[in-house]
Image: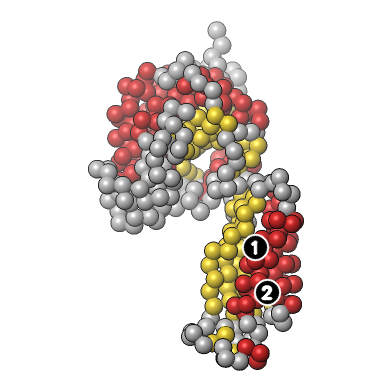
Amino acid sequence: MPIKNRFAELLPEITAWRRDFHENPELMYDVHRTAGIVAARLREFGCDEVVEGIGKTGVVGVIRGRQSGSGKVVGLRADMDALPITEQTGAAHASKTPGLMHACGHDGHTAMLLGAAKYLAETRNFDGTVVLAFQPAEEGGAGGLAMVQDGLMDRWGIQEVYGMHNSPGLAVGEFAIKPGALLASADEIEITVTGKGGHAAMPHKAVDTTLVASHIVVALQSIVSRNADPLQSMVISVCTFQTDSPAHNVIPQTVVMKGTVRTLDPALRDLAEARIPALAASVAEAFGASATVEYRRGYPVTMNTPENTAFAAAIAEEVTGRPTNDVTPQMPAEDFAYMLEARPGAYMLIGNGDSAFCHHPAYDFADEAIPYGCSWFATLVERRMPVSA
């Protein structure tokens, strides 16, 4: 079955929801308006259970099928939060909140899952239970982890979980996925180099932390090129470099550098966490300085379970009538990874057409993708939990 006719009928309504979310973006866990609308819609649809406040401001909706003998429980997830970016789309539905915008399409993700919820509550043409998770704080706040820790999987007995993200550059009406690592882990590093401040005209009487830190920045790349398997992916980027020097002629006493570490392999992540402090300390020592490293683990690798990935791809092919695109792993991170650590499942990419890329001020979600996303969510539930004759 291709796109469900019901979603063609519902497209103006779902689009209106999406554009309303877009006009009223909210950050991190402060998604009270969005979550309130989601909860109200789910109740309006006739969901069997609607619970707010999971993972601080997340919303969970439960829909039971017309049959329950299978005992299966499938989880579907969408994210609700926006970004601290000033919008430059010029759209009629542009953000009404200065400095905030939906620059990653979470407004579209939420609207598509709401559309699927409305259809599933109307038809209930499945044998089992679907649990709809609308989460806050994907953009750096680990809202997915917060929902898991708040009992999302255990309280509702979720057995497998699926999510979706729009993909600029992929044509509308197309899907892409791969088994295994799809998106990278994202960790933070903060390196503090301490030397001996002094006059810039007399560097021999100081220990120049700027020079030491510069060598550390260069040396860190040896971890990528000489410690990591060249067939594996790793990114180490130093993104800020701050000294305590107040003037152009003062050698600073300390330098603080901040950056990110991205990998697609948990073993490489362990390697980076071990090697970065050791290398920074040894380079600093060679110059007569010292270096300390704070390594903070962030989102883990988004790891698609092979069997669930194959099933998700088959559903996409059923919806579109075309093969699902294979995709190379990407180095951005996604906190749906926490849900995939808790349960088997898969994360699907849906085409957003020739739009600006995510996190760009000119980005906007493609409303014409809505029927495809809704159909994928709904068909997945019906095929995963088919009604017996």
Relative vertical location of residue 77 with respect to residue 257 in this rendering, above or below: above
Between marks 1 and 2 in the image, the one whose residue lies nearer the viewer: 2
Residue 208 is situated, as x and y percent measured from the top left of the image, at: 63, 82
Which residue type does callout 1 highlight? Tyr
- The residue shown at (62%, 29%) is 308
Foreground pick, 328 / 11:
328
What is the spatial separation of the Cα atoms under label 1 and label 2, in whole angstroms? 13 Å
| 123 with respect to 253 (left or right) | left
Foreground pick, 40 / 342:
342
Q: Name the residue under label 2.
A: 291
- The residue shown at (54%, 64%) is 239
Residue 107 is situated, as x and y percent measured from the top left of the image, at: 39, 41
- The residue shown at (60%, 67%) is 190
Which residue type does callout 2 highlight? Ala
Quadrant for residue 72, please give it.
top right
The answer to whether any part of residue 263 appears in the image is yes
Secondary structure state at the residue bearing disc 2:
strand
- The residue shown at (59%, 53%) is 186
Q: Name the residue under label 1.
A: 295
Question: If the image is split into quadrants, where does the C terminus sit?
Answer: top right
Residue 146 is situated, as x and y percent measured from the top left of the image, at: 54, 49
The answer to whether any part of residue 32 appears in the image is no
Mark 1 and mark 2 in contact? Answer it, CB < 8 Å: no
Residue found farthest to the front? 201
Quadrant for residue 179, please give it.
top right
Relative vertical location of residue 264 with respect to residue 279 in this rendering, above or below: above
Relative vertical location of residue 11 with respect to residue 96 in this rendering, above or below: above
Label 1 Cα neighbours within 10 Å, binned few <14 / some 14-19 / many ≥20: some
Secondary structure state at the residue bearing disc 1:
strand
Instruction: Using the image, tell me which numbered label, if any, was put on residue 52.
Output: none
Label 2 Cα neighbours within 10 Å, binned few <14 / some 14-19 / many ≥20: many
